[in-house]
Amino acid sequence: MRTVTVNVDEVIHETDLALLFLLSSSNGNQQEIWVPKSVIEDADDISVGDSDVEIEIAEWFTEKEGIA
């Protein structure tokens, strides 16, 4: 799987299948986005409350969601 490094401000919530991330855009706005664990490299190493972390996410997903 080809991945892209995404800077995550905070991991807000977790379900069995996805993680909710708080991301900052280049214009300073923040957005919340749900990301399926299946497209996150080493998803089991990520915990709610983690902040200012770099996450490897499948390239196709970041392009689809406009978060690359």
Image (spheres, rainbow, N blue to C red):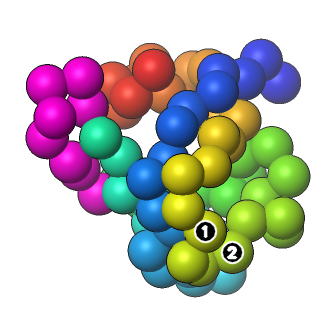
Q: Amino acid at mark 1?
A: Asp
- The residue under label 1 is 50
Q: Which mark is residue 23?
A: none
Whether pointer 1 and pointer 2 mark residues with C-beta atoms closer than 8 Å, the reply is yes
Label 2 Cα neighbours within 10 Å, binned few <14 / some 14-19 / many ≥20: some
Residue 43: x and y in percent read 77, 59
Q: Amino acid at mark 2?
A: Ser
**61 over 16 or under it: above or below:** above
* Start-end of magenta stretch: 25-32
Residue 8 falls inside the magenta stretch: no
Label 1 Cα neighbours within 10 Å, binned few <14 / some 14-19 / many ≥20: few
Helix, strand or loop at label 2? It is loop
**20 over 49 or under it: above or below:** above
Residue 11: x and y in percent read 51, 67
Residue 33: x and y in percent read 35, 54
Magenta-highlighted stretch: main secondary structure? loop
Residue 48: x and y in percent read 59, 78
Q: Give left or right: position of 23 versus 38.
A: left
Q: Which mark is residue 47?
A: 2
Residue 27 falls inside the magenta stretch: yes
What whole-number distance in Å separates the C-alpha atoms at marks 1 and 2? Answer: 6 Å
